[in-house]
């Protein structure tokens, strides 16, 4: 079995499980045949890009999990923040920057006070 086949299957299973989705739900949401989804999760075959792309987007996968499985992946909370930011318009992102900076500053200040 090729290394990437297992990386893809593992990443899909993990994402689907974390999101509480069935194989059927993933297939329906992505428009990909359920047999293809099953084959990917069971490490069979070599998925075509035309199937891989909608599945990755449906599962909101960080492609580094597939192509660089050895890298330490971000926590689910960090991943969720990244996806929320990616969905922002430029105007929304510009508005959020000072808010996020202020919140982080306050959190870090309170952490520093607790440590002392």
Image (tube, grey):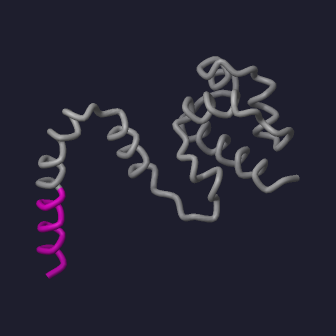
Query: Is 112 covered by the magenta stretch?
Result: yes
Which residue: 53% across, 46% down? 62
Q: Residue furthest bottom?
A: 116
Which residues are the magenta region? 104-116
- Residue 103 x %, y %: 15, 53
Q: Quadrant of residue 43?
A: top right
Which residue: 63% across, 26% down? 26
Compared with 47, 22 (above or below) is above
- Residue 44 x %, y %: 86, 40
Q: Main secondary structure of the magenta part?
A: helix
Which residue: 11% across, 74% down? 113
- Residue 52 x %, y %: 68, 34
Compared with 46, 1 (above or below) is below
Query: Is 11 covered by the magenta stretch?
Result: no
Quarter of the figure with the C terminus: bottom left
Q: Quadrant of residue 114?
A: bottom left
Compared with 11, 53 (above or below) is above
Which residue: 63% across, 31% down? 55
Q: Could you tell me how many numbered marks the image carries? A: 0
Between 69 and 42, the one lying in front of the other is 69
The answer to whether 31 appears left or right of 47 in the picture is left
- Residue 68 x %, y %: 62, 58
The answer to whether 22 appears left or right of 107 in the picture is right
């Amino acid at each position: 079995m090729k290394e990437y086949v297992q990386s893809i299957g593992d990443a899909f299973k993990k994402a689907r499980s974390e999101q509480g989705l069935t194989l059927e739900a993933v297939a329906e949401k992505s428009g990909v045949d359920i047999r293809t989804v099953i084959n990917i999760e069971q490490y069979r075959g070599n998925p075509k890009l035309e199937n891989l792309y909608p599945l990755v987007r449906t599962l909101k996968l960080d492609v580094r999990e597939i192509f660089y499985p050895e890298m330490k992946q971000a926590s689910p909370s960090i991943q969720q923040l990244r996806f929320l930011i990616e969905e922002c318009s430029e105007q929304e992102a510009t508005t959020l920057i000072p808010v996020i900076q202020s919140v982080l500053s306050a959190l870090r200040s309170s952490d520093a006070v607790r440590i002392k």
